[in-house]
């Protein structure tokens, strides 16, 4: 009967569960043997691929236009009515496989994850998980609608960030204040969403007989290779090694700008008084030139990217009412990546596209694994997903030169790379702020239910880990930052992965400086493994090590600072 399933989820995403249920019933009643286990897993895989693709097609349609009520309703119907029944049926199949004692090659880690799912599963949590997605979509709608009037036209808050690159300090300040004021207007609405999410997540943990939501989420994310205490040690290592390096960057910025203190609107402008880098005006040029960059880097990766381009799987331009942020997902049934972002003509957009393309390359390589549990979006460790994407930011750097088919002169590329490397150093302390805030929120949930206490905690963390930015007179804007981070609402505790991935990616980059073909071969091999190896082994396959210690951080920061010094010499000699 599985031959009757559609080849993609374009139509399947509208199926009611009663059309899907017979396929689950068929899988549930089959007797499992060594002779039929592979065929059974392949049939289950086909069904799972359609379900994952259906979810992401609905999410993409809703995010493309947050005012599209039909798309929103279709998404909410899927997550509220259909997905809970799917989750229950999926859990039955997981338990059936576990009870059989059967396995296939490369399935040890998927079975480990299934055992965790089985321990965590509670039917009472199914409607709560659906409601969690609905609330996150509500946050997405609120923030996606944030626009302001700027110089005579309505502009998204996302697009307004381009003004922060303007050499005119007064203009930067005015645009920053305008954006912050608009964000503050939604504070009460977001408070309500946060309080509902916090209560819901506490209930998820209680239903699962766990003391707090952090324990629930750790298991849900399959974090078997490091603990919350390891994260605290990582925070301490960043405070020891990276915060001083970040302070040097901020001090240099303050000196070169000639300002008494560094304000929030001073963090992105070019230090030489140059106009902001505008690598493209038309998003089609961005798409084409990034394609040329990948062709120079690696023809196989370029082939994956060209496929996305040919098949209109890139939604890149910013527009009013488009959902915020950038992401890449997998349309699993057709085995194609899909990239969503909000390009406005900045260098950051170039970096975002190569980053998200790295996620796409991960899916393309992992499609070689035969079973969904070895490569599905919810199974591959996020830490490895982010190594795949962040590595591209470093590996593509030499090919951004115009002479290599890219965007920049040698001097402009040096400027861009300095910004990127400094930004990576500055990111680690901010990562700690976001991660530490979430650890605080879910270990102090009674306090976190009061938005004023969330504001106090967020502000204290910002001042501790990023002490060099002066927020005097803007306490409310500083305190509002926790309301602006999508991860806190949509994918809780998904942030430390970026810090770990940065370490992994820099190690991949370091390897490429001495042997690029070997580094690329290891990178692609690691991606092709999907989730058939434990996380430390996936890092090792990519030529890196999973580390949360000061020594590894220091090695990477030293390489980054030395490279910045070389690039500074290029700029100075121009």
Image (cartoon, helix red, strand yellow):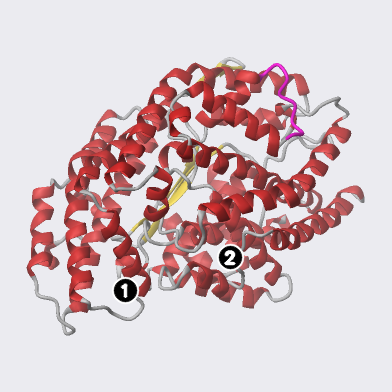
Q: Is residue 296 visible?
A: yes
Image coords of residue 359 (percent x, y): 48, 58
Residue at x 28%, y 80% (from the top left corner): 104
Q: Tags 1 and 2 in contact by the CB under 8 Å rule?
A: no
Query: Is residue 471 covered in magenta?
Result: yes
Image coords of residue 548 (percent x, y): 62, 59
Above/below status of 219 relative to 3: above
Image coords of residue 439 (percent x, y): 51, 42
Q: Quadrant of residue 36?
A: bottom left
Q: Which residues are magenta?
A: 467-474
Residue at x 11%, y 63% (from the top left corner): 4
User: Mark 1 against mark 2, which lies toward the viewer?
Assistant: 2
Above/below status of 189 relative to 38: above
Q: Earlier in the sequence, mark 1 or mark 2?
A: 1
Image coords of residue 249 (percent x, y): 80, 43
Q: Is residue 314 left or right of residue 393?
A: left
Residue 370 tag number:
1
Instruction: Tell me how far mark 1 sits from mark 2, CA to CA.
Output: 26 Å
Label 2 environment density (alpha carbons within 10 Å; few <14, some 14–19, many ≥20): many
- Identify the image quadrant of the N terminus: bottom left
- Element carrying mark 2: loop
Q: Main secondary structure of the magenta part?
A: loop
Q: Is residue 155 visible?
A: no
Label 1 environment density (alpha carbons within 10 Å; few <14, some 14–19, many ≥20): some
Query: Is residue 266 covered in magenta?
Result: no
Which residue is farthest bottom?
35
- Front position in the image: 229 or 101: 229
- Element carrying mark 1: loop
- Front position in the image: 153 or 388: 388
* Mark 2 lies on residue: 546
Residue at x 32%, y 66% (from the top left corner): 373
């Amino acid at each position: 009967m599985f031959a009757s399933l559609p080849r993609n989820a374009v139509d399947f995403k509208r199926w009611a569960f009663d059309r899907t249920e017979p396929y689950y019933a068929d899988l549930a009643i089959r007797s499992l043997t060594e002779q039929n286990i592979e065929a059974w897993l392949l049939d289950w895989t086909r069904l799972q691929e359609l379900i994952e693709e259906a979810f992401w097609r609905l999410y993409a349609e809703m995010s493309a236009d947050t005012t599209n009520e039909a798309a929103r309703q279709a998404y909410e119907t899927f997550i509220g009515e259909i997905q809970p029944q799917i989750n229950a049926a999926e859990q039955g199949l997981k338990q059936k496989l576990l009870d059989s004692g059967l396995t296939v090659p490369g399935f040890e880690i998927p079975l480990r994850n299934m055992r965790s799912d089985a321990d965590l599963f509670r039917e009472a949590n199914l409607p709560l998980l659906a409601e969690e997605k609905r609330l996150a979509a509500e946050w997405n709608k609120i923030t996606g609608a944030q626009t302001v009037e700027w110089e005579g036209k309505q502009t998204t808050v996302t697009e307004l960030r381009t003004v922060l690159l303007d050499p005119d300090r007064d203009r930067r300040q005015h645009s920053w204040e305008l954006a912050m004021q608009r964000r503050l207007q939604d504070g009460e609405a977001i408070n309500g969403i946060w309080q509902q999410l916090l209560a819901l997540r506490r209930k998820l943990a209680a239903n699962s007989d766990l003391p707090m939501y952090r324990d629930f989420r750790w298991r849900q994310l399959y974090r078997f290779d490091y603990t919350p205490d390891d994260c605290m040690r990582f925070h301490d290592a960043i405070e020891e090694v990276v915060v001083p390096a970040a302070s040097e960057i901020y001090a240099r910025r303050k000196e070169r700008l000639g300002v008494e203190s560094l304000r929030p609107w001073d963090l992105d402008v070019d230090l030489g008084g140059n106009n902001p880098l505008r690598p493209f005006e038309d998003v089609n040029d961005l798409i084409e030139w990034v394609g040329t960059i990948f062709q120079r880097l690696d023809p196989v990766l370029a082939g994956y990217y060209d496929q996305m381009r040919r098949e209109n799987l890139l939604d890149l331009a910013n527009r009013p009412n488009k959902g915020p942020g950038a992401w890449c997902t997998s349309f699993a049934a057709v085995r194609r990546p899909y990239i969503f972002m909000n390009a406005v003509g900045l260098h950051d957009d170039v970096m975002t596209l190569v980053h998200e393309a790295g996620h796409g390359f991960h899916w393309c390589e992992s499609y070689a694994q035969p079973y969904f549990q070895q490569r599905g979006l919810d199974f591959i460790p996020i830490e490895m997903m982010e190594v795949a994407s962040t590595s591209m930011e470093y590996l593509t750097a030499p090919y951004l030169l115009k002479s290599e088919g890219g965007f920049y002169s040698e001097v402009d590329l040096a400027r861009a790379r300095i910004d990127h490397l400094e930004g990576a150093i500055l990111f680690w302390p901010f990562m700690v702020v976001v991660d530490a805030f979430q650890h605080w929120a879910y270990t102090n949930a009674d306090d976190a239910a009061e938005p004023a206490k969330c504001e106090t905690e967020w502000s204290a963390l910002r001042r501790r880990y990023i002490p060099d930015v002066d927020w005097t007179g803007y306490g409310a804007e500083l305190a509002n930052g926790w309301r602006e981070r999508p991860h806190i609402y949509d994918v809780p505790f998904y942030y430390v992965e970026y810090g770990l991935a940065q370490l992994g990616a820099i190690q991949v980059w370091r390897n490429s400086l001495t042997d690029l073909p070997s580094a690329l071969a290891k990178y692609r091999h690691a991606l092709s493994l999907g989730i058939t190896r434990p996380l430390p082994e996936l890092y090792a396959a990519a030529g890196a090590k999973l580390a949360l210690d000061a020594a590894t951080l220091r090695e990477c920061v030293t390489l980054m600072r030395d490279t910045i010094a070389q690039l500074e010499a290029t700029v100075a000699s121009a």
